[in-house]
Image: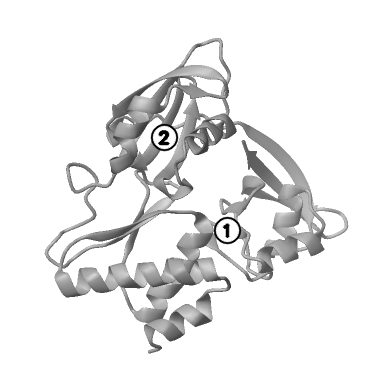
Amino acid sequence: MASTSESIQSIARTQEERILLTQIAQKAETCREKCYLTYTKFLDMHETALADRLLRSLGERGVFWGGYEQAERRILFFVPDWMDAVPTEGEDCPITAIRCLRSKNDALTHRDYLGSLMGLGLRRDGIGDILVSDHGADILVLKDIAPYLLMNYSQAGRKHIQTQEISLADLVMPDEKITMLRDTVASMRLDAVTASLFRLSRAKAADAIRAGKVFVNQQECIRTDKEIAPHDRITLRGTGRGEVEEILGESKKGRIVLSLKRFG
């Protein structure tokens, strides 16, 4: 098994990634040697993929969780043997939620909420998913920044909001806008399906995959030839998410006919 430094050097492509992976390795070591719960801040999908590769390389065990089951931004927990599971409530849980209530006449987007949070001087890794719905938004945050938000967060996108802390059990999942698409592909390879789903050339889709920008079922995939199946979800970082709903058959030219969903 490779040493920690060797594993980090083989996985990281930038100095920022090396720093992140070093911090993760240190948290794993602290948990193992001192037998108490350790965890990171919120990781995005690319950082989660890097962390997962490091864990597998080192033979370490960790748990990714972001406050609810399908969270995209997640914290990596290292759980000591004496604990049964990641604490999802109570004092030991590092995640809480802030509910932002807006006027019914005001329209606010994910970008409005995120931009205003950054305007308060917060770091992105202190903030998890932002769940925008009819009432406003439920925002997952590290528990230690919640008091600051409750005191100072009163405006998003130039609109007034009211904030309150809520239980993770009370999170409201947004109703996603779905656009149905129908297209044909030469094969069920990831590059072909990604190109169809996001209206790209196959070459650009392949470049995005090799650059680590494409995720299948929340797992980073850099294989352009990965076989995609119905109900697989594909995320193109910075662009959006979609799903293969169904294979409808073959066209007269022998191409595969797909029913696709685009979210958002």
**Residue 60 placed where, x, y %?**
32, 75
- Viewed as shown, does residue 231 lie left or right of 74? right
Q: Residue at x 18, y 75 (%)?
A: 33
For the residues labelled 1 and 2, say whether their Cβ atoms are less than 8 Å apart. no
Name the element at disc 1: strand
Decide: is 90 above or below 45. Answer: above
Three-letter residue code for mark 2: Ile
Q: Residue at x 71, y 57 (%)?
A: 193
Q: Nearer the viewer, residue 145 or 7?
A: 145
Q: Name the residue at the left extreme.
A: 82
Q: Residue at x 31, y 71 (%)?
A: 26
Give the crowd class for mark 1: few <14, some 14-19, many >=20 residues within 10 Å: many
**Residue 206 placed where, x, y %?**
74, 65
- Viewed as shown, does residue 58 lie left or right of 175? left
Mark number displayed over residue 71: none
Decide: is 211 above or below 90. Answer: below
Q: Disc 2 designates what residue?
A: 139
Name the element at disc 2: strand
Q: Nearer the viewer, residue 125 or 171?
A: 125
Mark number displayed over residue 215: 1
Kindly tell me whether residue 61 is visible in this rendering. Answer: no
Give the crowd class for mark 2: few <14, some 14-19, many >=20 residues within 10 Å: many
Decide: is 12 above or below 63. Answer: below
Three-letter residue code for mark 1: Phe
Colouring rule applied to residues: one colour
